[in-house]
Amino acid sequence: MKIELIGTGCTWTKKLATSYIIDDHIMLDCPQGSFKTLFTKHKLDKIDTVIISHYHSDHWADFHLFVEALKHKNFTNKVKVFAPVGFWEKFECLAKAFYLPKTLIFAKEHISFNQLKNGKVFKIGRLNFTSYEVKHIPDSFGFVASDGETTVGFSCDTSMCDNLIKIIKKSKVVFIDMASTQPNDKHLCVNEVINLKKEFDKVQFIPIHLSDFSTHVAKNKMKLPYSGQIFNI
Ligand SMILES: [Zn+2]
């Protein structure tokens, strides 16, 4: 499985917010600021599937620009969007707020929406994904992706919860939220990730959604990824 990290940060840092391109055609999250990198470094018309983990702006605020780019390229294929409940209502609000009526029409013609649910299994290309509702804001999801040989977990934004442990137990490698320096009910903190690494010592953990604070606390304790890093897992 080829996984490219577009960004590794959360909102409150100079780093680009966390998102991924998987196997060159699946985009997992589309945060604010990511579009310029996507537009200059990637062939956007190769991306046929977008997964939105939840509706915070640092996970989907540039999605309308992705749709705009496809419209300008006269893209004709359908794009599958897997997202929490309410996708069209929220996209219509964005299109109205940014005065993009033609983009909304294009989106309705070219996007098929698939609603994420806890435990839902869906196939994208050669990969099987399972979505798990995690503890962040309502309707937030993490994922496990498997190609039959290797299984990779994506905690996305979460604090400690049973489904996070399920994701870890199923995975060889886990991209894990490490935004915080103190335990809280929205994100994982550095010590929680360190303890998970000790408890599940056969699993490789890659911390993401990093803040400047968590980066500072963790930099001498573990290896941190960088924007643009490619993992072949
Ligand atoms: Zn969030």
Image (cartoon, rainbow, N blue to C red):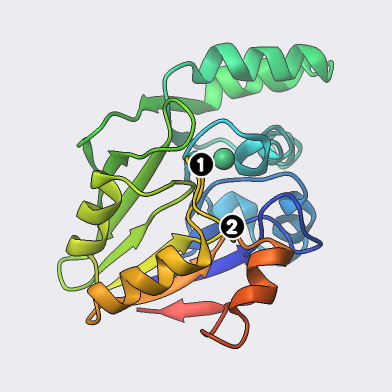
Q: Which residue lies most toward the front here?
A: 182
Secondary structure type for disc 1: loop
Q: Which residue is more in the foreground, 189 or 144?
A: 189
Residue 218 appears anywhere in the view = yes
Q: Residue at x 32, y 69 (%)?
A: 196
Q: Which residue is more in the foreground, 136 or 126?
A: 136
Q: Which residue is more in the foreground, 150 or 24?
A: 150
Q: Residue at x 60, y 57 (%)?
A: 18
Q: Amino acid at mark 2?
A: Ala
**Screen quadrant of the C terminus:** bottom left
Indicate whether 39 appears above or below 190: above
Q: Are marks 2 and 1 in contact (CB under 8 Å)?
A: yes
Kindly tell me whether mark 1's CB lies below 8 Å from ligand 1: yes
Indicate whether 100 appears above or below 156: above
Q: In x, y percent, where is residue 111?
A: 50, 27
Earlier-in-chain disc, 2 versus 1? 2
Give the residue number, with chain letter if any, for mark 1.
186
The part of the image, by quadrant, that contains residue 70 is top right
Q: Residue at x 39, y 53 (%)?
A: 155
Q: Amino acid at mark 1?
A: Lys
Q: Which residue is more in the foreground, 80 or 122?
A: 122
Q: Which residue lies most toward the left here?
A: 148
How packed mark 1 is, by other alpha carbons closer than 10 Å (few <14, some 14-19, many 20 or more), is: some
Q: How many marks?
A: 2
Indicate whether 113 appears above or below 82: above
For the residues labelled 2 and 1, the Cα–Cα distance comes to 9 Å
Secondary structure type for disc 2: loop
Give the residue number, with chain letter if any, for mark 2.
179
